[in-house]
Amino acid sequence: MGVVADKLMTAEEFAAKYDDAPFELVRGSVVPLAMPGSNYHGWVCAKLARYLDEFVEAHAPGGAVCSNDTYVVVGRNPDTVRGADVAYWPMAKLPGGKLTWGLIYNPPHLCAEVVSPTNTWSDILTKVDEYLAAGVPVAVVLDPDTQTATAYRKPNGHGDDGGQVFKVVEDLTLPDILPGFSVPVRKFFE
């Protein structure tokens, strides 16, 4: 990916200039987002966002489920702002208890990525690592090729176990951040 600008930008400058544009800020440099190249990617993202939003509305009112490369600040000095396919903030993490325009500096409780033909696993896992390092408790990766959902959490000193893999015949559950949330993995891909 080519760099769009030579001068290092802050998260604030980036958000003001590139709001709603297909870019991310990586260590102060603007880089193009890899477009998924498939409507299927957006369809899987929409399904995940729908299931999360329905659950949040019923069980965690006031929380916000966002999609469409929602900006997540994952690093400062130099700044990094990633575009999450889906993100969830509980109400307590939203400035003033509600969703507004602009960057949210509190890390979401969940960031999710859907693997597309234009992603490399290295790129996906780099974003997962950045989300976790920024304080996101859970990063979920949906992989249409293997029809799996993998929930990554910050290692607890016992090393990285590669995440908790949920197969197509299992239910994706996230009891540590959304107690009671349970969706059959197959539902994301059918």
Image (spheres, rainbow, N blue to C red):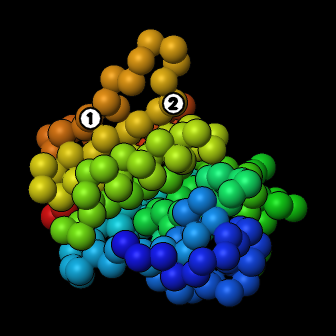
Q: Position of residue 102 (x, y in %)?
A: 74, 75
Q: Is residue 8 above or below residue 150?
A: below
- Kind of residue at badge 2: Lys
Check disc 1 and report the residue beneath it.
165
Q: Is residue 38 visible in this depiction of the protein?
A: yes
Q: Residue furthest top?
A: 158
Number of numbered labels in the structure image? 2
Q: Position of residue 52 (x, y in %)?
A: 47, 57
Q: Residue furthest front?
A: 6
Q: Is residue 135 above or below residue 59?
A: above
Q: Position of residue 159 (x, y in %)?
A: 41, 18
Q: Position of residue 87 (x, y in %)?
A: 53, 59
Element marked by disc 2: loop
In depth, the one of 30 and 68 nearer the eye is 30
Check disc 2 and report the residue beneath it.
154
Query: How much space separates mark 1 and mark 2, taking CA atoms?
Result: 15 Å
Task: Identify which residue is drawn at 51% across, 67% down.
Answer: 83
In depth, the one of 133 and 111 nearer the eye is 133
In depth, the one of 31 and 40 nearer the eye is 31
The image quadrant that residue 164 belongs to is top left
Tell whether label 2 touches label 1 (CB within 8 Å): no
Q: Is residue 72 visible in this depiction of the protein?
A: no
Task: Identify which residue is drawn at 63% across, 84% down.
Answer: 19
Which label lies toward us, 1 or 2?
2
In depth, the one of 124 and 58 nearer the eye is 124
Q: Seen in the image, is 66 located left or right of residue 15? A: left
- Kind of residue at badge 1: Val
